[in-house]
Amino acid sequence: MRILIMGGTRFIGVYLTKELVKQGHEVVLFNRGNKPAPVEGITEIHGDRKDANQLKQKLASEHFDAIFDNNGRELSDTQPLVEIFNNQVKHFVYVSSAGVYLKSDQMPHIEGDTVDPNSRHKGKFETESYLEKSGIPWTSIRPTYIYGPQNYNDLEAWFFDRIVRNRPIPIPGNGLHFTQFGHIQDLVKGMAAVLGNETAIGQIYNISGERYVTFDGLAKACAVAAGKSADDLNIVHYDPKQFDFGKKKAFPLRMQHFFADIHKALQELNWKPEYDLVSGLKDSFENDYLASKRDKADIDFALDEQILSAS
């Protein structure tokens, strides 16, 4: 297939580009050209996707079998693409987020569950609703927390920063909130698995790791991945309501149960995660955290100190 990837040089797009090229597809990237392409010699079209006129001008004469929209956050980002390629592409794959789900007493989140109209990801749900009505053959992917080398969100690195320096790990609440991490390589394999799959048309899939983990359990898994003993960790629980951190985040995860059922993807996409949590974290620790020398970097622990001095 000739495939267009929106973005392609940051995180999901880097892994997806490599995966699709490996599978023999011809991949074209559309981005601003600020970062090098992940595969040498790959075709890139440079432009600003936020400018609908520019998008149409640069892409109207192109033909693609499939499109992966990895970085559309609002409906206005994606609608021009659909208008250009409706009745042309065989598959439009949209990366949404499990963050669209409404907080619930009954877990895990399942595709079709109520969404939160006030979520910061509401633009993604609006886009999914638009795709459903547009007539384009679409599939939407809803990951939970994505991790792995090149992750630009401080998730696993937040824990590693404290573990390698033998610092206490301040965790809000009692540490028993369940969350879910999915390795980036597993995510892009799931995304690639929707191509040519008729069952996937018009469907939404949660894609993440198979197991859920508590906040404390995540800290322990990070310790094991970093070659330390989980028993030696000094986890400090605190009540976040006792502190005013302003706009800064003292902890990188939502203070709630946040995990999604992936059975639908397992059953319909002939896909299965290859990484368990510790092996995925080890990949991140060795091939990104240590490789980038972040273990030697100067990290700001001011919020930690604020919490620890009060406990």
Image: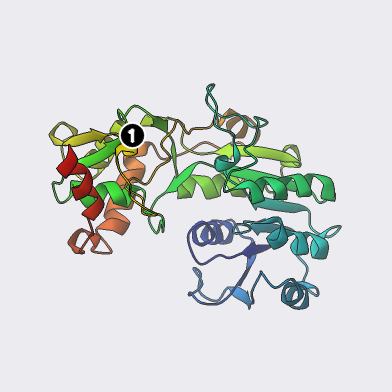
Position of residue 50 in the picture relative to residue 85 (left or right): left
The residue that mark 1 highlights is 215
- Identify which residue is drawn at 21% across, 48% down: 306
Q: Residue furthest top?
A: 106
Q: In this view, does 64 lie above or below 44?
A: above
Image quadrant of residue 268?
A: top right
Q: In which quarter of the image is the C terminus?
A: top left
Tell me if residue 302 can be seen: yes
Position of residue 136 in the picture relative to residue 168 (left or right): right
Query: How many labels, in total?
Result: 1
Along the line of sight, which residue is nearer the eye, 107 or 197? 107
Q: In this view, does 80 lie above or below 93?
A: below
Tell me if residue 2 can be seen: no
Q: In which quarter of the image is the N terminus?
A: bottom right
**Residue 267 point in image, percent of width and height:** 62, 29
Image quadrant of residue 215?
A: top left
- Identify which residue is drawn at 48% across, 59% down: 11
- Identify which residue is drawn at 71% across, 56% down: 75
Image quadrant of residue 59?
A: bottom right
Q: Is mark 1 on a helix, strand or loop?
A: helix
Position of residue 124 in the picture relative to residue 210 (left or right): right
- Identify which residue is drawn at 22% across, 60% down: 299
Q: Residues within 10 Å of mark 1 (few under 14, many from 20)?
A: many
**Residue 263 point in image, percent of width and height:** 58, 28
Q: Is residue 75 above or below residue 175?
A: below
Q: Which amino acid does label 1 sit on?
A: Phe
